[in-house]
Amino acid sequence: MKAFMSSFGTDPRLYNGQSTMCENSNTYYLFRVFVLLLAAISFADSIQSTVARTPVKGIPAPVYVRSVDEFFLMEIKEYHVFNARAADSYVKVLFSTTTVIKDFKVLKLSECEIDDNGRISFHEETLYEQFELLPECPIMVIMTFFGSIPNNGFSYIDKDGTTRKFTVNLSGKDGRVEIEEY
């Protein structure tokens, strides 16, 4: 036991015969399991994805959006990068898909208006466009978020030829990236 404790830079003589975490194996292993569990929960939450849902048809959109960190990006072999950052504060957002998506665009949204029927519209400026978004090559967009009104979005043309548009915003509850069709 001395070699184990010495390897961590502690001297067992400093404890005057009192039990330490290293000496009490049950406490030590419970502590390690707790730390590993917290790390696993944190990692799972960091890669949590949000799926766009179509309110009219009830069919999930094939584009997945999630915030990512450098650790997660090391796992991806190939991806595009676009910097849409407008301030020092930013979030790295990964757009990925399970099928080929046509005419994918990253949008800057402004001038939010709501009509009498409750439908939201925005003035849209295309910041980035890609002819196809492929499953094997997602795009990471560095985005700045301002307040609770969405200022970022994306669009694509679905298999029926319809242009689908979504806002990208951060959740006020936990800071996760959320998308909503408009």
Image: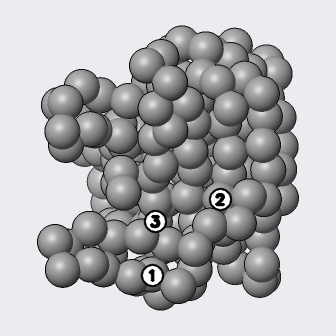
Q: Quadrant of residue 85?
A: bottom right
Q: Earlier in the sequence, mark 2 or mark 1?
A: 2
Q: CA distance from mark 2 to mark 3?
A: 12 Å
178 vs 102, left or right, is left
Say which element carries label 2: strand
Mark 3 or mark 1, whichever is nearer to me: 1
Q: Quadrant of residue 53?
A: top left
Q: Earlier in the sequence, mark 2 or mark 3?
A: 2
Q: Residue at the location (46% across, 59% down)?
A: 167
How packed mark 2 is, by other alpha carbons closer than 10 Å (few <14, some 14-19, many 20 or more), is many
Q: Position of residue 140 (x, y in %)?
A: 72, 43
How packed mark 3 is, by other alpha carbons closer than 10 Å (few <14, some 14-19, many 20 or more), is many
How packed mark 1 is, by other alpha carbons closer than 10 Å (few <14, some 14-19, many 20 or more), is few
Name the residue type under label 1. Cys
Q: Position of residue 177 (x, y in %)?
A: 45, 56
Mark 2 or mark 3, whichever is nearer to me: 2
Q: Position of residue 121 (x, y in %)?
A: 42, 70
Q: Position of residue 116 (x, y in %)?
A: 18, 80
Q: Residue at the location (58% across, 74% down)?
A: 123
Name the residue type under label 2. Leu
* Disc assigned to residue 169: 3
User: Does the rendering let one see residue 151?
Assistant: yes
Give the camera-side residue of 59 and 17.
59
Say which element carries label 3: strand
Find out whether the residues at labels 2 and 1 contact each other: C-beta distance under 8 Å. no
Q: Earlier in the sequence, mark 3 or mark 1?
A: 1
Instruction: Give the labeled residue for mark 2.
Output: 107
* Disc assigned to residue 112: 1
Q: In this picture, is 39 found above or below 73?
A: below
Give the camera-side residue of 178 and 7.
178
